[in-house]
Amino acid sequence: MSKDDDDDDFYRPPAPTTAGLMFPARSKFTVRGFTLARTPAEMYWRQFISASQLERATCLLALADPNLWNLHDQPRPVSYIDASGRQRTHRFDWLAEYRDGSRVAMAVKPAERVEKLSFRSTLAAIRRDLPKGFADKVCLITERNHHPKEVQNAELLNFFRRCPDEEADLLVAETIAGLKDELSIDDLIKPLGLGARGFRAAFRAIYAGHLQANTRERISTNTTVAPRKEKP
């Protein structure tokens, strides 16, 4: 192995998606896109494929959850028996693994299509016949489950995670350890003299579970934060 291979600054391209299904690049029904991210389980950057903005938003929100351990895009299909007695297959959009060992299979569809296709009854059959060990819970996600500001914050978080800054994270963590009351992010980071680096570190600290904040509002330097009393 060369010296460059051991160098942490050596560029490594993101790994490809692990999805079991690839959508066509051009389609009337899908809009294929990728999100670059990494999970605690893998700790390397890779592509997460999505076929719609709704699927991408679900991905970003899942990645923002401090309890997430790993996320699988388009996992292997599962078989089920429909209402007419016919065997069919379904592929979930996401399969999330959490730090406590639980697994959640996510079906993502626009609310209009859920009603048009009577998808809730289909999902009930899928849940009934789910292979043992595949998932502990099955959930349906529509645009009604997403708060627009939460999605915006989750997207910004993913961008900030792509700019790691251990020094800033450490300094902010040390400041948080001494906090007793709530204050604005600006007041939290101003004494550190880090500027934008401090804001990004505070932002990451919120989603790491070290600070409490209202994530249903756009997080800014004016956002009020407080030390988290309990770990997420």
Image (cartoon, helix red, strand yellow):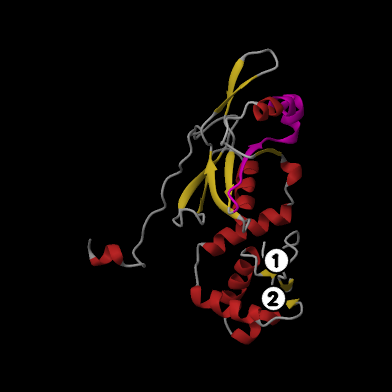
Which amino acid, by three-letter code, is at mark 1? Ile
Please say whether residue 51 is visible from this viewpoint.
yes
- Residue 109 lies within the magenta run: yes
Dot 1: few (<14), some (14–19), or many (≥20) neighbours within 10 Å? Answer: many
Q: Is residue 64 left or right of residue 12?
A: right
Q: For the view shown, which residue lies furthest in the front direction?
A: 132
Residue at the far bottom: name it: 191
Circle 1 SS class: loop
Which residue is more in the foreground, 130 or 93?
A: 130
Residue 16 quadrant: top left
The CA span between labels 2 and 1 is 9 Å
Residue 85 location, x and y as percent?
Answer: 66, 13
Residue under the point 69% across and 29% down: 123
Q: At which x and y percent is residue 51?
A: 57, 37
What is the quadrant of residue 208 in the picture? bottom right
Out of 106 and 145, give the one closest to the viewer: 106
Residue 195 in sight here: no
Quarter of the image holding residue 111?
top right
Whether 98 is drawn above or below 212: the answer is above
Question: Which residue bears the numbered disc 1?
Answer: 219
- Secondary structure beneath disc 2? helix
Chain part drawn in magenta = 100-122
At 72% from the left and 70% from the top, the residue drawn is 229
Residue 121 place in picture, x, y as percent: 74, 25
Report if residue 10 lies within the magenta region: no
Asked whether the residues under the numbered discs 2 and 1 touch, taking CB atoms below 8 Å apart as contact, a structural biologist would say yes
**Depicted 32 relative to depicted 1: above or below:** above
Which one is in front, 41 or 55? 41
- Tell me the kind of residue under disc 2: Ile
- The residue to which callout 2 is attached is 185
